[in-house]
Image (cartoon, grey):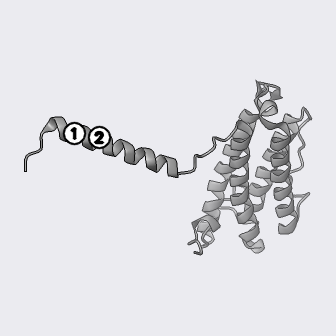
Amino acid sequence: MKIKYSVAVPAILLGMLVSTSKAQESKPSAKALTVSEAVLASWNDIGRKVIAMAEDFPEDKYEMKPTPVQRSFAEQLLHVAGGNDYFTDAAQGKKPRDDESREHYKTKAQIVEYLKKSFAEGATLIKEKGDTGMMAPAVEAIGGRTVPAFDLAYGLIEHSGEHYGQLVVYYRIAGLVPPESRPKKQ
């Protein structure tokens, strides 16, 4: 059967266009995230992952180090929490705290509590600042630059992600599977 180009091609294209249009109408439109919503989503996502590791990793392995010169598992978590504190302090115009020392947090429970608190405080601050506050260039970052709060927040989100990757190595060396790598229950 031979179809004439002049009739067939426009009819097929019109059918595809109508089909695509109807498919788009039936899908709910996704609302674009605002700046503060996007920062908050990323902040909470990495927080969830790191906190899950802190809660899951055996306390008797909290002092484990892949090599003698590296931080222990506990020190890695405290460092992440300290970075989060840096964000919340700097974004509020405060002098950054320096209390991530292992001397202040001796047990797994204390470390987990501090880590949770640091992520919760950051999330609260991001919500409070909203888009306007997160976009305002009023935060002094490391190195003395003045940047918007969202820029500093993303830097600390990346920082937490880098340490998350390091903590995966601790899991693997200990013969364990990180929570995010385990099969999901259906």
Closer-to-camera residue (183/5): 5
The secondary structure type at the circle numbered 2 is helix
What's the mark number on residue 13? 2
Q: Position of residue 76 (x, y in %)?
A: 74, 55
In the picture, measured across the screen, residue 11 lies left or right of residue 36, that is: left
Using the image as rendered, state which of residue 71 and residue 7 is in the foreground: 7
Whether 111 is drawn above or below 37: the answer is below
- At a point 7% along the width and 51% down the height, the residue shown is 1
How far across and how far down the image is residue 130, in percent? 80, 37
Residue 141 visible in the current orientation: no
Looking at the image, residue 138 lies above or below residue 157: above
Cα separation between marks 2 and 1 = 6 Å
Quarter of the view holding residue 136: top right
**x then y, percent, for residue 120:** 83, 53
**Residue at screen point 75% across, 61% down:** 51
Q: Which residue is depicted at the point 68% across and 42% down?
A: 38
What residue type is disc 1 on?
Val
Amino acid on which disc 2 is placed: Leu
Left or right relative to 63: residue 12: left
SS of the residue under disc 1: helix
Name the mark on residue 46.
none
Q: Which residue is mark 1?
A: 9
Q: Do residues under tags 2 and 1 come within 8 Å of each other at their CB atoms?
A: yes
- Estimate how packed mark 2 is, as few (under 14), some (14 to 19) or many (20 or more) residues with alpha carbons within 10 Å: few
**Which residue corresponds to the image point at 69% horizontal and 62% vertical from the top-left?**
65
Residue 50 % position (x, y): 71, 58
Is 60 positioned to the left or the right of 92 in the image?
left
Asked if residue 67 is positioned above or below residue 144 in the image, the reply reads below
